[in-house]
Amino acid sequence: MKINQKDLWENLTLSNDFMFSKVMRDKEICRETLEILLDKKIGEITYIDNQKTIDINYDAKSVRLDVYVEDEKRIYNIEMQVVNKKDLAKRSRYYQSMIDLNAIEKGEIYRDLKESIVIFICKFDPFGEGLSKYTFENICNENKELYLKDGTSKVFFNTKDYYKERSEDAKSFLEYIEKETTSENNFVKKLEQKIRNIKENKEWRAEYMKSLLREQEIARDNFEKGKIKGREEGIKNLIESFKELGINEEIIVQKLIEKYGLSEQKAKDYLR
C-alpha cells in the first residue's frame, strides 16, 4: 500500500513537529500558547526561531529545537513529543544546557543569563503519576523550601489527562492535541484557522514533502537495522518512525502486514 503524500499533508495535525513549528511561527499564537501553558503574562517576543539548531562545535551533538522564543527576561523552548522514548529527563537537561552555552557563546556572562524554560507537550504521561502538568525546579534536598534559583525550569504536559487542568484554555488546548477534534474554545479556533492557512501554502507543502522523504529514508534504514538486530526491534523502529511522521495508524498497520507478514490483529497488537 503506497502512502499518499497529499493525504498525509491534508491530515497533519498540531501534534506533528512540522505543523507545530509552522503554527508557532505566528508570534501572537506562540506568545498566547506560552501564556496559556505557563499561566503567566509573556513579554513582547523580540526573537523567535523555529526548529533552531544549536551546534556549539564540530564534535558536539547538535540540538534542533522545535520552537525557540526569547523575550526580555526569558528563553522558552517548546517541544512536541508524540512517541515516548523514555529519555525526556536527560533530553530536557541537555537542551537547557545547550541553550545556556549558546548564550555564553554569543557573549553573555553568567550573571546576565536569562531564565530558561524547557517545555515538552507529550501525548502520553511522561512520569506515570496521572498529572496533566509536571514542573521541575532545583531545590535543596535538606530544606524543601530552599530553591537554588538558577533561573531554570522544566515543564512537561500530559495530554492524556488534559481534563485535570484548572485553566479552561489550557484544558481545551491539551484536549485539542490529544483528541485532534474541533472545539468551541476561541484559541483552539484560532489554531485551526492557522492550520488551514498553512495547508494552503504550496512552499510549505513542498518543504514537508522533502522532509517526509528524508524521514522515510531513516525509516527504511531503521528497518534494515531491525533485520540485523532482530524482528522485534525492527518492528519497534518502524512503528516509532512512522508515528513521528504523523502517519495514520491504519497505514502503519498495513505497512507492518506488508513488511513482516503479520496478521491484522497481530499488527494492531504491536501498535498498541
Image: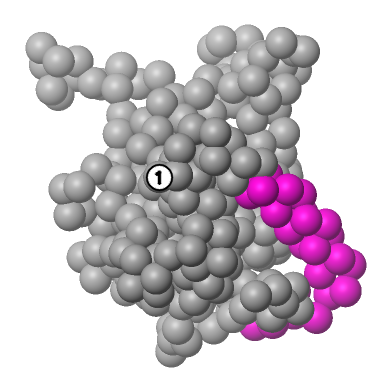
| Residue nearer the viewer, 148 or 217 | 217
Residue 29 lies left or right of residue 117; in this view the side is right
Quadrant in the picture for residue 25: bottom right
Total marks in image = 1
Image location (x, y in percent) of residue 29: 61, 65
Q: Is residue 146 magenta?
A: no
Residue 267 lies left or right of residue 99; in this view the side is left
| Amino acid marked by disc 1 | Glu
Residue drawn at 45 percent across, 38 percent down: 230
Image location (x, y in percent) of residue 89: 37, 31
Q: Is residue 218 magenta?
A: yes
Q: Which residues are magenta?
A: 193-220
Residue drawn at 35 percent across, 21 percent down: 149
Provide the secondary structure element on which disc 1 rests.
helix
Image quarter of the C terminus:
bottom left
Residue 87, visible in the rendered structure: yes
Judging by the rendered image, the residue that carries numbered circle 1 is: 232
- 10 Å neighbourhood of mark 1: few (<14), some, or many (≥20)? few
| Residue nearer the viewer, 125 or 209 | 209
Image location (x, y in percent) of residue 221: 66, 41
Residue 154, visible in the rendered structure: no
Image quarter of the N terminus:
bottom right
Residue drawn at 88 percent across, 74 percent down: 202
